[in-house]
Image (tube, rainbow, N blue to C red):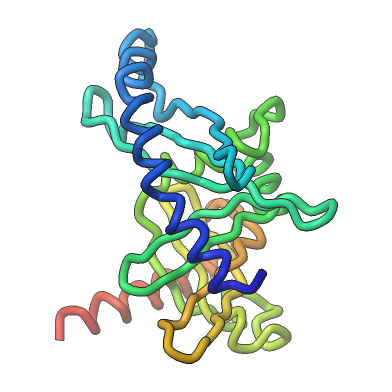
């Protein structure tokens, strides 16, 4: 299955996911309201019988007593490898792949809760980091940037730290290109060198200046 086929499958199953989300919303809201302290999220596993595809439907709040928001993830297996996928059609079709290494590093370096499953880690990351700021990467930020060339040309600055990724896209005649990003590892900003932090800030300032022009 190529990238366009994966994307079309995920988008094609959205109506079923939307239906299940609406059915789960009252339960999720009640569960989040009865907790004694603010909890960012609650999540449910869901398998679509016709395709056997496995999904995670999760609900979250960005602030205490704020509106309950929702989103989806897909759990995909490639042999012995397990990936958690998020897809979007915002601006352009794209698939974000959260590798096991990325999730493990986020758990170890930020959450520091070894008992969490990969699904719980992925949902916590996305519920806590709803806005990801693209940042151009060079060798000041990633010393291996030259090795990966254009595929390592961009990372994401999140609330919790910095996400390193490898990116590409698939083109197919008569269809819009589908982008793919593999989230490879995670670093809290406090664990990065001063020069890395300064380079990230510099790239963010460039983007802000470009937007104001």
**Res. 128 in view:** no
| Residue farthest toward the front in the current orientation of the protein | 50
Residue at horizontal 73 percent and vertical 86 percent from the top: 147
**Res. 83 in view:** yes
Q: In this image, 191 relative to 126: left or right?
A: right
Q: Position of residue 200 (x, y in %)?
A: 46, 70
Q: Position of residue 105 (x, y in %)?
A: 68, 48
Q: How many tags in the picture?
A: 0
Which one is nearer the viewer's eye here, 180 or 206?
Answer: 180
Q: Position of residue 103 (x, y in %)?
A: 65, 47
Residue at horizontal 31 percent and vertical 31 percent from the top: 22
Q: Tell me the quarter of the image containing the C terminus.
A: bottom left
Q: Tell me the quarter of the image containing the N terminus.
A: bottom right
| Residue farthest toward the right in the current orientation of the protein | 80
Which one is nearer the viewer's eye here, 203 or 171?
Answer: 171
Q: In this image, 97 relative to 60: left or right?
A: right
Residue at horizontal 61 percent and vertical 55 percent from the top: 98
State whether residue 82 is above or below residue 19: below
| Residue farthest toward the left in the current orientation of the protein | 213
Q: Position of residue 137 (x, y in %)?
A: 53, 78
Q: In this image, 79 relative to 134: left or right?
A: right
Which one is nearer the viewer's eye here, 106 or 70?
Answer: 70
Residue at horizontal 31 percent and vertical 75 percent from the top: 205
State whether residue 131 is above or below residue 196: above
């Amino acid at each position: 299955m190529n990238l366009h086929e994966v994307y079309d499958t995920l988008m094609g199953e959205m109506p079923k996911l939307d239906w299940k989300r609406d059915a789960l919303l009252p339960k999720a809201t009640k569960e989040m309201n009865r907790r004694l302290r603010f909890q960012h999220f609650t999540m449910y596993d869901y398998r679509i019988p016709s395709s056997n595809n496995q999904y995670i439907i999760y609900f979250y709040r960005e602030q205490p007593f704020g509106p309950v928001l929702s989103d989806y993830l897909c759990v995909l297996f490639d042999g012995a490898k397990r990936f958690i996928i998020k897809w979007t059609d915002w601006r352009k079709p794209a698939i974000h792949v959260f590798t096991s290494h990325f999730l493990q590093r986020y758990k170890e370096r930020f959450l520091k809760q070894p008992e969490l499953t990969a699904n719980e880690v992925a949902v916590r990351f996305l519920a806590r980091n709803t806005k990801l700021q693209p940042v151009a990467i060079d060798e000041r930020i990633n010393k291996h940037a030259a090795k990966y060339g254009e595929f390592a040309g961009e990372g994401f600055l999140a609330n919790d730290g910095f996400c390193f990724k490898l990116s590409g896209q698939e083109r197919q005649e008569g269809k819009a290109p589908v982008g793919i990003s593999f989230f490879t590892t995670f670093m809290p900003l406090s664990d990065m060198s001063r020069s890395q932090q300064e380079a990230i800030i510099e790239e963010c300032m460039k983007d802000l200046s470009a937007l104001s022009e």
